Image (tube, rainbow, N blue to C red):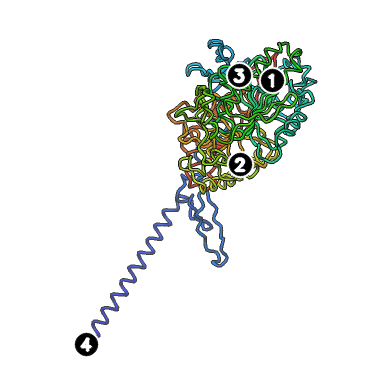
Amino acid sequence: MAIWTNLSHYLTSKSKKANLYYVAATVVLCCTFYVIGLWPQGGVNTTQLSSTTLLPTLPCNPSIKNTNSNYGSSISLEFTAHHTATDLVPLSPSARVNHFPSCNPELSEYTPCEDSKRSLKFDRNMLIYRERHCPEKNELLKCRIPAPFGYKPPFRWPESRDSVWYANVPHKHLTVEKAGQNWVRFKGDRFTFPGGGTMFPRGADAYIDDIGKLINLKDGSIRTAIDTGCGVASWGAYLLSRNILPISFAPKDTHEAQVQFALERGVPALIGILATKRLPYPARAFDMAHCSRCLIPWGQYDGLYLIEVDRILRPGGYWILSGPPINWENHWKGWNRTAKDLKAEQDQIESVARSLCWKKVTQKGELAIWQKPTNHMHCKINRKVFRKPPFCQEQDPDKAWYTKIDACLSPLPEVSNIRDFAGGPLANWPERLTAVPPRIATGNIEGVTAEGFSKDTELWKKRVAHYKALDFQLAECGRYRNILDMNAWLGGFAAALVDDPVWVMNVIPVEAEVNTLGVIYERGLIGTYQSWCEAMSTYPRTYDFIHADSVFSLYQDRCEMEDILLEMDRILRPQGSVIFRDDVDVLVNVKSIVDGLQWDSRMVDHEGGPHVREKLLIATKQYWTTPAPDQDKQPS
């Protein structure tokens, strides 16, 4: 038995030694073949074995750093992404192709939807021919609108309020026509704006002081204002220093370039007219509306134009009128009209105002001020006396894109007490900017809560800080003045820029699922409706900076991407910038067209990091102009 035990132990020991020899031999052979395999590649790099050695086709070469001294010379794992947005598309300037030539120099001030030649096809009754009439698809230009020869970057605000380069708006017509009214003067290489106007010979500042003696302009209750028939927008320009944010509008008419002057001065303005269509703003938008000798026939057409002013005035808002027929008793001879005619006009205006339930606050000198009621409780009762205008039935008062003005009164939201503000009270400025807007607080904006509004405000503060880190021009105080947000949602982008010397035109696309423009106005900001399948009612070179958040995702299968980008090129100033925010696949297509516009561009990652599909495309329009008058060479 002992012999058998010893034999078994001997065999087991011998078997283990044999297995050890086999393992050792296998290891030696594997190492030998591994070294032989590496030898054709130039041998082993003993200092670093990186991912580029194993995957030589990848375009990144991450450096390996030891970030933890506790592990001596061990290699730390790195989880940072090495494939960023810039790897998605070629960024070499040599890859550019000039797909879009420059337009004829005669088109340097082309406004597609207010083209004077096209307007002649339309009815002159009620000035229909001066409304928006956009080109058909086959009439769209496929070229870049040039800046005039000698174009210079505008003066920085606030100097721009008083000075504009002649080369940028080469029109002296108003300096002659309005020479006695101090609208604008020309000297040397620039225009200057003394601040005068037809009805404020002492200047816009003194005129606004006169208004401030009649209504309170200092407590923040008046924040948004609209100037109808604005001239060169001096009234709006001088309101800005009082923390009142105006929109000025005027038609493209015989007063050549008046809106263009306003924009060059850095004052918010649009081409527009009161005719047969609603103004492109929501109901209850403005705290104050103003007309200084604006030549609008307020009493005619059953008071249609005052009905439209009533729609866009907030409850308790003011309408200010100066010029004919106000104070006709003392001025009728100088106005070359009969006293009877002027009295009849003022009586007509007074009658319409009463039918709208407005209260006349005061008339002093050449100024008359009316106030809209804070709710319609009394107004509904007095419809028994004033049968016209009736209240509108089943009509959305916020709808205002090619919407016909009806001769009916837009009803205010219901209230339970005569002292209540219809729709909810608004905080005074600046608290108004971050207070929950009444439309959200009352649940009238689908899918938006008070909590969601606050989160959106904070989100855009972070996003704008990120933008400024990427675009040094946006971060430079005063470099930009006129800014456009093409898809503004709740106005968070504009709110985050409120401390900068800029103004933002917040656009709500008419194709958006939820209409939030009323919210933007309730925050004390301004904006307009717009379809980006059409041109904007503004002059070329209006904006210093454009923000396009998810615009091209919204307009997929609606209209051509290149047409939207050509419109952006038209309204963007030379050396102005754009930040696109959209899905990566969309931005790759955008960039291919942007290169054809000869913009400098680069794609960068979302502020949340490279793993987010949404990316940013930052683009800058190159400086170029029409050739000098004696040159035939086309700009490039």
Location of mark 3 (residue): 299
Q: Give me the C-alpha separation between circle 4 and circle 3.
A: 131 Å
Q: The N terminus lies in which quarter of the figure?
A: bottom left
* Mark-to-mark CA distance, 2 and 4: 97 Å
Give the amino acid at mark 3.
Gly
Image: 137 above or below 364: above
Q: Which mark is nearer the camera, 2 or 1?
A: 1
Residue 68 location (% of width, % of height): 56, 63
Q: Nearer the viewer, mark 1 or mark 4?
A: 1
Which one is earlier in the sequence, the residue at label 3 or at label 1? 1
Q: Amino acid at mark 1?
A: Arg
Counting residues from the start of the chain, the first of labels 1 and 4 encountered is 4
Label 4 sits on residue: 3
Query: In the rendering, at what x and y percent does residue 106 appear?
Result: 63, 15
* Residue indicated by mark 2: 495
Mark 4: amino acid: Ile
Across and down, in percent, residue 360 comes to 65, 29
Closer to the chain start, of discs 4 and 3, is: 4
Read off the residue under disc 1.
293
Determine contact: label 2, label 1, CB under 8 Å: no
